[in-house]
Image (spheres, rainbow, N blue to C red):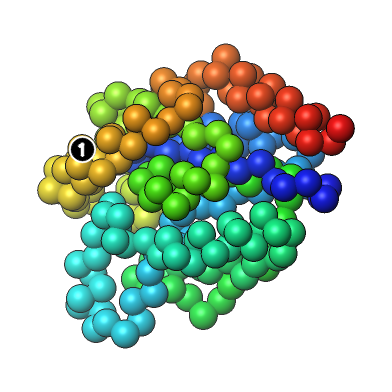
Amino acid sequence: MSNHKPVVIGVAGGTGSGKTSITRSISQRFADKTILVIEQDYYYKDQSHLPFEERLRTNYDHPLAFDNDLLIQHVNDLLNHKSIEKPVYDYALHTRSNETVEVEPKDVIILEGILILEDPRLLELMDIKVFVDTDADVRIIRRLLRDIKERGRTIDSVIDQYINVVRPMHLQFVEPTKRYADIIIPEGGQNHVAIDIMATKIQTILNRKAI
């Protein structure tokens, strides 16, 4: 970790757009000590004060679901070369876990999440803003496969949630943040040219800071 201010990159896009694939591909181009990934999903609000039945009704695709105050505080700490205690979210209990993960600052911080470009305070901290723009039919198929395989969901429950929550929230909150992006990447992790360009841009900034 150098003494220079870390580079902050925001990677947004709808569910199943390929944000994680893009982030992973970029990270693999650099040494482990260079890039830190902070997922917005870790910063869902603590709901321990609510009854479990009420927690079940949480809309995780709405901006109010996120504790951006804590995320912003943590990004500022990392920018000042301080380590943070990153929260852990317990999806079974629908609230924040008592556990945290200690995270050390690195030269590049990638903030990844569906609404990472939604908060103006976060935008001000970013050097590069990316929106991963993937067709809705591809995104729903990816989400369907993920939720069935990894989260034990039924096809009906995934489709019902997508139609009633995910899609309207995407149109209302996620899609409009595309206007703030410096770079729009179509088709997510399959776009190797865009990933090459991003990696080159990051290296250029790092080289500039090293001088």
Quadrant housing residue 137: top left
Under tag 1, what secondary structure?
A: helix
Question: Residue at coordinates 42% horizontally, 61% vertically from top-left?
Answer: 68
Q: Position of residue 53 (x, y in %)?
A: 20, 77
Most foreground residue, 12 or 70: 70
Please state if 25 lies on the left or on the right of 118 as rendered: right
Q: Position of residue 9 (x, y in %)?
A: 57, 39
Residue extending furthest top? 193
Please state if 88 lies on the left or on the right of 5 as rendered: left
Q: Position of residue 49 (x, y in %)?
A: 31, 85
Quadrant housing residue 141: top left
Q: Residues within 10 Å of mark 1 (few under 14, many from 20)?
A: few
Please state if 8 lies on the left or on the right of 28 as rendered: left
> Does residue 1 lie above or below 100 as drawn?
above
Quadrant housing residue 127: top right
Most foreground residue, 3 or 54: 3
Q: Position of residue 172 (x, y in %)?
A: 20, 42
Q: How many marks?
A: 1
Res. 203 in view: no
Amino acid, disc 1: Leu
| Mark 1 lies on residue | 171
Most foreground residue, 41 or 105: 105
Most foreground residue, 149 or 24: 24
Q: Could you tell me which quadrant the C terminus lies in? A: top right
Question: Residue at coordinates 78% horizontally, 46% vertically from top-left?
Answer: 4
Residue extending furthest right? 211
Question: Residue at coordinates 63% horizontally, 46% vertically from top-left?
Answer: 109
> Does residue 191 lie above or below 93 as drawn?
above
Res. 30 in view: yes
Question: Residue at coordinates 13% horizontally, 48% vertically from top-left?
Answer: 164
